Image (spheres, rainbow, N blue to C red):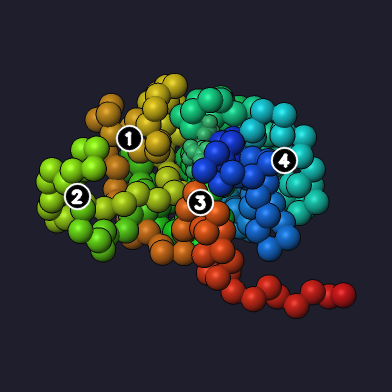
Amino acid sequence: MSVWAVIAAAGSGERLGLDRPKAFANLRDRPLLAESLERLEGSDWIDSIVVAAPPGWEEPVILLAEELGCGKVAEAVTGGTTRAASVTAAVAVVPQDATVALVHDAARPVLPEEVIERVLTALNEGWDGAIPVLPLSDTVKRVESDRVVETVAREGLAVAQTPQAFVAPVLRAALSDDEATDCSALVEARGGRIKAVPGDPRLLKVTEPADLEAVERVLGDPAPSDA
Ligand code: CTP
Ligand code: MG
């Protein structure tokens, strides 16, 4: 079994509002991407890594990987205008004989090894894909303009995280330049069987500036440097 990790890192990070793409936002004096890159490199489950980079940032991605000693990084491809297009570009360079594709958002830097293990174990059970989910804790409303039109029953609802793992040919067949905000939606739309496994609250998604501080809190104090 060969497992290829695909990091979706090509977004511009408009809501973060920085002068550079979100993947290069500063997290504890390193680019945000460094955190997930290092964790995938260090995972016993992952054989190779492809990064979908923001246009013009392919070289800095490769330099970062070299600096971190991430020898599993095979390539940095140019991402597309949607997340699905970026994943499609990255999956295109995954070898045909790869067994599994594990797609992860650079926007979720704190990637625990246990979650990688959970989604991959589900594939061994025969599922087409597996995704980490968390239960909803807030009451959910449907809102039109500013009017609340419905209280949505929370039962059976969950929020999806990444990494999302798929049998590689299944993901390949489902990918299209779609507006889908995760890969699972594309596989589900084609009738794929996706297992929901427990997610992890540490897998916070960096969207707004305050999220960076929240992630830094989750990471805790940096380890003392050798200097
Ligand atoms: N992504 C991508 N290619 C795109 C858009 C998004 O690879 N064209 C990736 C982002 O880099 C991120 C993940 O998909 O890791 C989730 O997207 P999101 O949080 O929306 O990031 P951005 O699109 O960069 O942010 P924004 O929507 O605020 O511009
Ligand atoms: Mg976006």
Q: Can residue 109 be seen?
A: yes
Gap in angstroms between the C-alphas marked 4 and 3: 22 Å
Disc 3, SS = loop
Residue 187 lies left or right of residue 120; in this view the side is left
Q: Residue at x 72, y 40 (%)?
A: 61
Disc 1, SS = helix
In this view of the protein, which residue sits in the foreground, 126 or 200? 200
Asked if ligand 1 lies within 8 A of label 4, the reply is no
Position in image of residue 9 (x %, y %): 59, 40
Which amino acid, mark 1?
A: Ala
Do the numbered discs 1 and 4 sit on residues whose CB atoms are within 8 Å? no
Quadrant housing residue 48 = top right
Pointer 2: what residue?
A: 141
Gap in angstroms between the C-alphas marked 1 and 4: 28 Å
Which amino acid, mark 3?
A: Glu
In this view of the protein, which residue sits in the foreground, 196 or 98? 196
* N-term-proximal mark, 4 vs 3: 4
Gap in angstroms between the C-alphas marked 2 and 3: 22 Å
In this view of the protein, which residue sits in the foreground, 93 or 85? 85
* N-term-proximal mark, 2 vs 3: 2
Gap in angstroms between the C-alphas marked 4 and 2: 40 Å
Disc 2, SS = strand
Position in image of residue 36 (x %, y %): 60, 53
Pointer 4: what residue?
A: 61
Pointer 1: what residue?
A: 185
Do the numbered discs 2 and 3 sit on residues whose CB atoms are within 8 Å? no
Position in image of residue 149 (x %, y %): 13, 43
Quadrant where the image shows the C terminus: bottom right
Pointer 3: what residue?
A: 208
Q: Can residue 41 be seen?
A: no
Q: Residue at x 35, y 38 (%)?
A: 184
